Amino acid sequence: MTAPFTFSPEVQAAKANGQPIVALESTIITHGMPYPANRETALNVEATVREHGAVPATIAIIDGELRIGLDNDTVDELAQQTDVMKLSRADFAFAVAQGKHGSTTVAATMIAAHLAGIDVFATGGIGGVHQGAEQSFDISADLHEFAHTPVHVVCAGAKAILDIPKTLEVLETLGVPVVTVGQENLPAFWSQDSGIASPLSVKGINEVAKFIAARQQLNMKGGVLIGNPVPADAEIPKPHMDTIIAQAIADSEAEGVQGKAVTPWLLGRIVELTDGASLETNKALIYNNAAVAAQLAVALHS
Ligand code: PSU
Ligand code: MN
């Protein structure tokens, strides 16, 4: 049986040599940032992973083919195309069956990484429970994926457009560990401090590696969510961000934005409302997550 995916030459070589690998998602490229910041960020994230001793594997579906590792031309193509499907668990296989281009969200990237034998993944912020979910029922499939799929994800917290306490409640119900590195409180994506205690916290990445090893010994399923605060010099303090987010959510409601479109629409609106400042913070936090994920991959695999 042939594998249901294709490695890039770089990832193939890393596999053959037993090097640590970090998976990267592609929804940030297609639905998370405008062009050309998306292209620049995707390539810089890969470079950051390499600088920290691991090999990057950006994941996407190209003409129905699941690719583990992308060449720069393909990154550029995804960055400019406007009709790429945003894939989660529900529609991942549909894009394969129909021969489409699809970008992978956190949930879909975890599925693909696990298929390919990669267990560390860096992103910006995971999806979660949206504000007003008691009406809309909008809860990201990312949360359920952690319960099933043993891929460990470094992020800067749940995106602050979400309802963070409700997101933590769902993760707890699903048995998903949330561990923050270097502080007691959960980060809030653009801001270092959400003001909400992280369920677990550790001083450094070696403790995360030990925690993952203990989970494996105890035969526990699923992934660990690792919170890594945005660097201080790049953050937008929470009081300011809260005002911006409230405005963006009000605007999205006025526009009637729903479903899969909500997260990309809010991210885009927040870039406008902050005159581009949120985009700079978004880039900085992703690079920071890529560096920590590479360190984790090294700690787990050497
Ligand atoms: N992190 C970012 N930008 C993004 C996303 C994460 O910095 O665009 C994407 C991820 O792919 C995440 C998705 O899985 O947003 C969540 O979408 P939804 O809320 O529709 O599940
Ligand atoms: Mn949703």
Image (cartoon, rainbow, N blue to C red):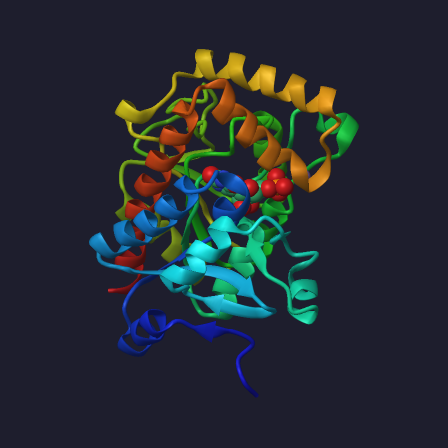
Residue at the image position 44 percent from the left and 52 percent from the top:
152
Q: Which residue lies furthest to the bottom in this view?
A: 1
Residue 95 image-quadrant placement? bottom right
Compared with 68, 165 (above or below) is above
Residue 176 in view in this figure = no
* Residue 15, position as x, y percentages in the image: 34, 74
Q: In this view, does 34 lie to the left or right of 14?
A: right
Q: Is residue 36 left or right of residue 16?
A: right
Residue at the image position 36 percent from the left and 37 percent from the top:
283
Screen quadrant of the N terminus:
bottom right
Residue 94 image-quadrant placement? bottom right
Residue 6 in view in this figure = yes
* Residue 47, position as x, y percentages in the image: 27, 53
Screen quadrant of the C terminus:
bottom left
Q: Which residue lies furthest to the right in this view?
A: 135
Compared with 234, 2 (above or below) is below
Compared with 2, 139 (above or below) is above
Q: In this view, does 129 lie to the left or right of 186?
A: right
Foreground residue among 72 and 261: 72
* Residue 127, position as x, y percentages in the image: 57, 39
Residue at the image position 55 percent from the left and 43 percent from the top:
31
